[in-house]
Structures are given as structure tokens and as C-alpha cells.
């Protein structure tokens, strides 16, 4: 299911937005596994995109 997912690392500059939850989860898990860093993933699908409201 498409949406908006925010993945961020708490220990380095890794931060990305994804449209698919499975891709976001995979990238979060891959970075955490490779680096040992703490990660967060947030579903921001219901939030308005700044600058795009009418």
C-alpha cells in the first residue's frame, strides 16, 4: 500500500522518505544491521505536505 514513510537514523545523517512501507522497513533494517545504529520509522501518510495545501 502506498503512503509516506519517514526513516531516520538517530546516530548519523541517514534520513529518507519512501512511498512503500515494505521498502521503508527494508531500508531501516538494512541500515541498522550494517551500522548497528538506532533507527525510527514513522508513517506520515496522513500529514499534509507543506506548501501543497490550497
Image (spheres, grey):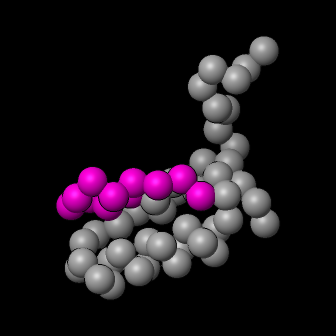
Could you tell me which residue is drawn at 33 percent across and 58 percent down?
14
Asked if residue 19 lies left or right of residue 30, the reply is right
Asked if residue 20 lies left or right of residue 24, the reply is right
Asked if residue 54 lies left or right of residue 45, the reply is right
Percent of width and height locating residue 21: 64, 68
Percent of width and height locating residue 39: 35, 67
Membership of 21 in magenta stretch:
no
Percent of width and height locating residue 30: 41, 80
Q: Is residue 42 above or below residue 32?
A: above
Look at the image and give the residue range highlighted in magenta. Answer: 8-18
Residue nearer the viewer, 51 or 10 = 51
Quarter of the image with the N terminus is bottom right
Could you tell me which residue is drawn at 67 percent across and 32 percent down?
48
Res 43 visible: no
Q: In the current view of this chain or complex, which residue is farthest to the bottom? A: 33
Number of numbered callouts drawn: 0
Could you tell me which residue is drawn at 59 percent across and 58 percent down?
18
Could you tell me which residue is drawn at 76 percent across and 60 percent down?
2
Percent of width and height locating residue 16: 47, 55
Quarter of the image with the C terminus is top right
Question: On the image, which quarter does residue 11 sit in?
Answer: bottom left
Q: In the current view of this chain or complex, which residue is farthest to the top? A: 54
Question: On the image, which quarter does residue 37 sit in?
Answer: bottom left
Q: Is residue 32 above or below residue 49?
A: below
Residue nearer the viewer, 44 or 28 = 28
Residue nearer the viewer, 42 or 17 = 17
Res 38 visible: yes
Amino acid at each position: 500500500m502506498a503512503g509516506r514513510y519517514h526513516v531516520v537514523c538517530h546516530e548519523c545523517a541517514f534520513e529518507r522518505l519512501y512511498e512503500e512501507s515494505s521498502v521503508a522497513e527494508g531500508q531501516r533494517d538494512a541500515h541498522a544491521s550494517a551500522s548497528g545504529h538506532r533507527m525510527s520509522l514513522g508513517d506520515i501518510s496522513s500529514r499534509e505536505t507543506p506548501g501543497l495545501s490550497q
